[in-house]
Structures are given as C-alpha cells and as structure tokens.
Image: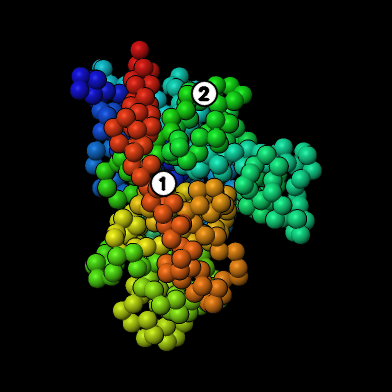
C-alpha cells in the first residue's frame, strides 16, 4: 500500500499502435498498472484514437500523425506502420518534453512502454533519457516465426513453390510453409518491418500479453542473444477492469438473444477488426450457418459505405433463419465468449480473440485470414488442440460440416475438453501466485526501480 501511494507520482507513458487488436491490450496494461498505483499517460495517434471517456483515470495525449488516406486504407498495414514511425517521433518528443518541463515537484515520467509497431518511441525515450519497454500484443510463437524469415531466405527455403507449401518448416514445428507470415507485403518489406519491430534493440524489458505455460518454448528464444527482462503478463483482459476498449460502437442487444439460447449451443462467428469476407464468401457462410442447424451469433462488419449488415447477406436468408440467428455489426466479444450459451467460435485467430476464447474454454474453428493469424491457427489446432482448422474453400456444405463437427459430433468433444483444460490453467496463472500475476507484480517493481 505504501508503495502504491508513492507510485502515484510516477507517470508511465503508453504508446499504443492504432489498431483495435493493439489498442485493447495496451489500455488493459494501463489499467492494471494504474491499479498498482502508477499514473498513466496514453500517447496516441489521431488516427483510430481511443475514447478517453472510457478511461477517465488516464491522461490522453494526442500525437499528430500526418497520415494520408493512402496510409490508412485497408490492406496497407506495412505502409501505415512505416508512415507512423516516420511522422510521430518529433510530435511525441515535443509533447513529452513539454509535460516533463511542466511537471510539479515530485511528479516524474519514469518510462515509456511502446507497442512493438511504434518503435520510433525508442528514439524519443533515448532523447529524453527515459528507460523504455517493448510491449507485444502478438503471440510469441508468431514473433518467433517472423524472426526466422531471414534465416529461411538465406538457406533457400523461401520463396517456395505452391506445391511445397504443406512441408514443415525446419526448426519451427508444428508450422508449415503455408502458415508463415510471408504474405503481408513483399519479402523485402516484411523483413525490414520485422527487423525494426521484433529484433532485439535498446529496450530495458519485453512485456508480453501471453501466458508462460502456453508459450514457454517460444518465449525462451527471446532471451537470446542478449538476456533481457521478460514479463509475460497475459491474458491482460482477465486482470483489467471490464471498461470498453472498443473503437467501434458495441451492439449489446445480442446478450439478451444469447440469454434465450441453450447452454453451449451457439456458434459465434467473427473475423476481427481487419479482415473482411468477399460477397461470395458472405453468401456461402450465410447458407452454411443456416444449414448447420445450430443457433449462431455472427458479426458482419459493413464498412462505411453500407448502413445495414442485412444488405450484404443473401435474399431470403433473414426469413430462413428467423430467431435462430443474431447478426450484429460489432459485438461485446469478451462478454459473448464468457456467456454460457456460446459453445464454439468461428474465428480468424487474431491473438486477442485467441486469448479471449482460451480464457473461457471455448473451442474454435480456425479460419485465419492474414498476418499472424495462420501461425496462431496452427498452434490452436495442432499444438494446444483446442480448435479445428478449416482449410477448404469457404463453401456452404464444408461450413455446415465443420460447425457440426465441433458443436455436435463426437470429434468436437476432445477439442472442447482440451479448451476447458487450458481455461483452468489460464485461470490459475492470473490468480494469486500464478505466473502472470507474479509477473505483473515483478513488472510494477521493475518500473518503480527506475525512480531510484
Ligand atoms: C489484428 C490482427 O488481425 C491480429 O491477428 C493481431 O493479433 C492483432 O491485430 P484483429 O483483427 O483486430 O487483430 O483481431 P484480434 O487480435 O482478435 O482483436 C480483435 C479485438 O476486437 C478482440 O479483442 C475482440 O474482443 C474485439 N472484437 C471483435 C469486439 O469487441 N467485437 C467484435 O465484434 C469483434
């Protein structure tokens, strides 16, 4: 308690990347550090800025980002990251220098914690003589695969012919070449981004939104070549307050619909904040869900040009499903996955969705779309065995079979049991004396030590 009082004067600066899957865990980290007594400053871009009214206890510091429409257009992630890192360094440096200059006696900015994508923050920290820490919102398994791309290129394994994509990647079991994140840009851009964002640099510690027991082997690889403090503190959403971290308006009406469904009967379908289904895929998904016979809750994001999700779905679908289906533009996902009625998750396997599903013991059908999702999907299905990978073309019969396979048939039972086992282990890790609980306390002590 005494420590907590002293920490109020210590201001921790958080620099989240402006994407939903990155902002949420950073705000959750801010929330748990605030509960340990620190004052929190969130330095954020204007693009995709978080809603300050959801976190009245934080100070929000908008940073001019000068991003063009081209930078922020969907599907242009590497260009977006590059522009942010080019444009935001000077504005962040000036804003923080101003805050530090204005601070009252006793108050102190003690460190910067930045999302690995926002690596310009390191130069700012060095200029202001502040320690900094690298926060990772991705899985360690993905980061390891990403880190290995230059080696695979040097050894001639990639680029690879389509006919050899099912081969296992040497040194990265259980990944196949088809799971590797080499498709998010040209190989040159992928490697440049990886070297700037993942490789060892001058931070004092890595904070990872993951759980030791899930990713111990991958995490150990990041302690080399130079030993670094590593705090695995996930899943942060299980330790943070339930305040909304959503960039989009949440439709909570689906919870009363869920209340009317039988336990574990509903398949929840969502592919996160970045991926979209093509019109033909939406049609196949709609008829696959209809013929599965299961109740379903489906998040259909519409984009700005379309005001109603129903306009995107096939004629006659609404009448066919009646009350058996619920469709929303954006769901309160963490509440949905924690609801008794939800028995399965058709997921794109973003890391947050993965952690949220594992934390509630909900087994998955993995339909990865981009970036890290294919690596996560392979771990979910082949390492942790808490999901079944959907590797067909998105076609109504295959969708129906996959849903029934997980929700109704015998084959889904083992997957569900494995998901429940992992849920128990995660609960243990966030409770008193669990690995993530202890790691968070260690992190708080580590930050406090910067004032000495
Ligand atoms: C992106 C990448 O796709 C992902 O692979 C990477 O790990 C992080 O950045 P995203 O598509 O946003 O992530 O997926 P994910 O990481 O799962 O994050 C989505 C977040 O949005 C989750 O926290 C989820 O709870 C939330 N969400 C999603 C909602 O609150 N409502 C919804 O309807 C859908």
Question: Residue beneath label 1, please?
Answer: 422
Q: Residue 193, percent across and down?
A: 61, 41
Quarter of the view holding residue 250:
bottom left
Residue of label 2: 228
Q: Who's the residue at 66% across and 51% down the image?
A: 176
Q: How many numbered badges does the structure rendering display?
A: 2
Identity of the residue drawn at 36% across and 17% down: 449
> What residue is drawn where x is 56% and y is 44%?
142
Provide residue 367's location: percent of width, then percent of height.
Answer: 53, 61
- Which of the image's four quarters has the C terminus? top left
Q: Nearer the viewer, residue 412 or 179?
A: 412
Give the class, few, some or many, for how many residues have Cα within 10 Å of label 1's Cα (few <14, many ≥20): many
Q: Is residue 338 above or below residue 152?
A: below
Q: Quadrant of residue 43?
A: top left
Q: CA distance from mark 1 to mark 2?
A: 28 Å
Residue 331 showing in the rendered view: yes
**192 sits left or right of 220 in the view:** right
- Circle 2 Cα neighbour tier, 10 Å, few/some/many (<14 / 14–19 / ≥20): some
Which circle's residue, 1 or 2, is located before the other in the chain? Answer: 2
Q: Nearer the viewer, mark 1 or mark 2?
A: 1
């Amino acid at each position: 308690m005494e420590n907590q009082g002293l920490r109020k004067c210590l201001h921790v600066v958080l620099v989240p990347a402006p994407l939903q899957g990155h902002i949420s865990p950073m705000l959750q980290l801010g929330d748990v550090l605030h509960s340990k007594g620190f004052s929190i400053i969130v330095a954020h871009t204007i693009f995709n800025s978080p809603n300050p009214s959801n976190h009245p206890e934080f100070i929000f510091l908008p940073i001019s980002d000068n991003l063009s429409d081209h930078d922020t257009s969907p599907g242009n992630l590497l260009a977006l990251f590059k522009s942010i890192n080019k444009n935001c360094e000077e504005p962040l440096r000036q804003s923080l220098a101003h805050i530090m200059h204005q601070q009252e006696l006793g108050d102190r900015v003690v460190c910067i914690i930045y999302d690995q994508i926002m690596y310009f923050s390191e130069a700012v920290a060095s200029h202001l003589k502040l320690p900094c820490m690298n926060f990772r919102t991705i899985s360690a398994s993905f980061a390891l695969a990403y880190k290995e791309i230059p080696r695979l290129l040097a050894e001639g394994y990639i680029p690879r012919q389509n006919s050899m994509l099912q081969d296992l990647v040497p040194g990265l079991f259980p990944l196949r070449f088809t799971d590797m994140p080499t498709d998010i840009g040209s190989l040159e851009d992928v490697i440049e981004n990886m070297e700037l964002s993942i490789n060892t640099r001058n931070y004092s510690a890595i904070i990872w939104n993951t759980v030791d027991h899930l990713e111990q082997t991958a995490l150990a690889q990041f302690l080399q070549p130079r030993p670094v403090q590593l705090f695995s503190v996930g899943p942060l959403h299980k330790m943070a307050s339930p305040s909304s971290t959503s960039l989009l308006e949440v439709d909570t009406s689906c919870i009363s619909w869920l209340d009317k469904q039988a336990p574990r009967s509903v398949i929840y379908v969502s592919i996160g904040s970045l991926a979209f289904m093509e019109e033909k895929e939406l049609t196949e998904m709609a008829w696959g869900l209809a013929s599965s016979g299961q109740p379903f809750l489906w998040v259909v994001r519409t984009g700005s040009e379309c005001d109603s999700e129903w306009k995107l779905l096939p004629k006659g679908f609404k009448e066919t499903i009646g009350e058996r289906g619920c469709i929303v533009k954006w769901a309160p996902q963490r509440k949905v996955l924690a609801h008794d009625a939800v028995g399965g998750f058709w997921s794109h396997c973003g890391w947050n969705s993965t952690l949220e599903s594992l934390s509630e013991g909900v087994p998955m059908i993995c339909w990865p779309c981009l970036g890290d999702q294919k690596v996560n999907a392979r771990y979910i299905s082949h390492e942790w065995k808490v999901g079944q990978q959907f590797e067909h073309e998105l076609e109504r019969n295959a969708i129906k079979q996959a849903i029934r396979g997980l929700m109704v048939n015998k084959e889904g039972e083992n997957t569900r049991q494995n998901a429940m086992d992992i849920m128990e282990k995660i609960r243990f890790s966030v409770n008193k004396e669990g690995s993530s609980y202890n790691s968070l306390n260690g992190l708080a002590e580590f930050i406090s030590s910067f004032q000495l």
